[in-house]
Amino acid sequence: MMKIAVIGAGAWGTALASLFARSSEVTLYSGNHDLVHSIEQRRENRRYLPGVVLSDSVQITDSLVDALRAVSGVVLAVPTRGLRRTIKACQELHGDSAPYLVTCKGFEVGSGLLPFQVIQEVLPKARYAILSGPSFAKDVGFGKPTIVSLASSEESSAAVFSGLLLRGGMRTYFNQDLIGVSMGGAGKNVIAIAAGMSDALGSGASALAGLVTRGLSEISGVGVALGGKPQTFMGLSGMGDLALTCFSDLSRNRRLGQALGEGKSVAEAETALGQVAEGIHAANEIKALAIRLEVEVPITTAVTRVLSNEISPDEAAKELFARIPRSEI
């Protein structure tokens, strides 16, 4: 039986530990001793994923050395802001002998790199795959079927994880377009903030559908200009992830947008959320990329202006609707 190390015991890491435990030996790692002790005692991560009971085949540890011992694969289930630090720690103890599965989305603060670019920079010889697409930790943790993209430059690296994921209830489709898959995962969070604001303002379902469609146009415009493939944005990591994130109240970024639309400040909305909303940082990164690549991103720009308190959500909606009509394509 294969042994998988899941690094990061947030909601997503806990959900994936539960999934992989259906076909493998799993070690779930967190540097938070109190969290590890709580999960060990209750067999449940009540802080991040309440209700999901972990099987006895999941070992919980706060020792990275123990987590990485004799593993067949390493799942990096940490936020993007902690990815580089985590990869470096794994490199010192594990190197690049077993493949990595990267699950975070967005951009690294400071460098503006996408997750796959971070791992390329730190571990240039590593085998790795990027997991992205329409999937919530709660659904995965409770064993509900999910369908996602598994991106890698070589199919053999993705194949290490694809069979295990399938046996755990997650169907994957292979994609070599690392840029497109990563941009879809980063951009959808920004549009989800806009979607949340739209609903809070009472704009209606028709306006929301139009907003999400134009949002996809912005994401694909920047992604293709970066070198991504247009068809990727119509797939699971593009349209699929965008639809889930914009239309479901389980979406952190959508809930953040709703709070802003209800009149809360960014700080108040973040506090109420209690979790990381990657769309806040991603909005600024995508806007900067769009300027450099000369791509128009009016929705993303409006979100950045709301987040910086330059305009209100209501003013943003009015400005977007008042833009001069132009060709759709």
Image (cartoon, rainbow, N blue to C red):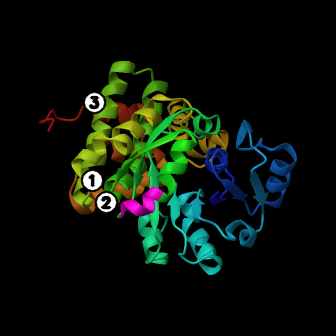
**Residue identifier under label 1:** 222
**Residue identifier under label 3:** 321
Q: Mark 3 vs mark 1: give the one in front.
A: 1
Q: Quadrant of the N terminus?
A: bottom right
Looking at the rendering, the stretch of residues picked out in magenta corresponds to: 154-159
**Badge 2 or badge 1: first in the primary sequence:** 1
Q: Is residue 106 visible?
A: no
Mark pair 3, 1: CA separation = 22 Å
Q: Is residue 192 above or below residue 283?
A: above
- Circle 1: residue type: Val
x and y percent of residue 161 in the render?
A: 51, 55
Q: Is residue 232 magenta?
A: no
Mark pair 2, 1: CA separation = 7 Å
Q: Mark 3 vs mark 2: give the one in front.
A: 2
- Circle 2: residue type: Leu
Q: Is the stretch drawn in magenta largely helix, strand or loop?
A: helix
Residue at 41% across / 62% down in the picture? 156
